[in-house]
Image (spheres, rainbow, N blue to C red):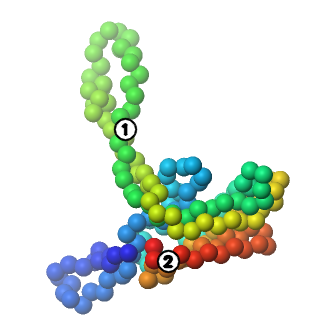
Amino acid sequence: MREAGALAGPEMGDNVRRAPALTKPIGLRQAGADSLTVLLDASAPLPNRRMAELIVAPAKGGSHALLSLWEGESSISVTKPERNGKAPANGADDDDDDEDEDEEVRSLVVKPQRQLVDLAVPVPADKKARIVLTLSVDAAGHGTLVAKSGSKEVKATFGSA
């Protein structure tokens, strides 16, 4: 957690209050995945609450959906688009290709870094279920994850985020 001070500056003096904020994103990790589905972004002000709805299937051979909440590390992935390798139809050079050669595609990737909590949510064994998640993090960085599926509710807490 860190102090966010977007409005702070020399013209504001020492009377500026700084709001606590996350330093790393928090999200769900699917089994075997190497990235997170972000629920709270890094620098999100605290306290904060997010709700999300998921459609999930039970774990293989079971009657529970497994949810894993992680703290992540953000990075930028840079890729170059593949060239199609086609020559211009009339045999002339295409000046527009020069602009495409240096083009890069940048995307934000959030990789799991530290596991915060796991939840096993009861769901019907034979079909997909709707789960409503509520993630709350207080100003001190302590959090609660609540998952509701039908009339069943599962809750877990985690330490400083």
- Residue sitting at 19 percent across and 87 percent down? 13
Label whose residue precedes the other's in the sequence (1 or 2): 1
Pick the quarter of the image with the C terminus: bottom left
Callout 2: 10 Å neighbours few (<14), some, many (20+)?
few
**Vertical comparison of 93 with 123: above or below:** above
Can residue 3 be seen in the rendering of this structure?
A: yes
SS type, badge 2 = loop
Q: Residue furthest bottom?
A: 15
Q: Inspect the image, locate mark 1, and give the three-letter code of the amino acid beneath it.
A: Thr
Instruction: Measuring from the top left, give residue 147's x and y in whole percent.
Output: 67, 70
Q: Nearer the viewer, residue 29 or 98?
A: 29
**Vertical comparison of 93 with 145: above or below:** above
- Residue sitting at 27 percent across and 15 percent down? 93
Callout 1: 10 Å neighbours few (<14), some, many (20+)?
few
- Residue sitting at 33 percent across and 38 percent down? 104
Numbered disc in front, either 1 or 2: 2
Pick the quarter of the image with the N terminus: bottom left
**Vertical comparison of 85 with 156: above or below:** above
Q: Inspect the image, locate mark 2, and give the three-letter code of the amino acid beneath it.
A: Gly
Instruction: Measuring from the top left, give residue 53's x and y in whole percent.
Output: 65, 63
SS type, badge 1 = strand
Instruction: Measuring from the top left, give residue 142's x and y in whole percent.
Output: 49, 79
- Residue beneath disc 1: 79
Left or right: where does residue 84 sit relative to residue 150? left
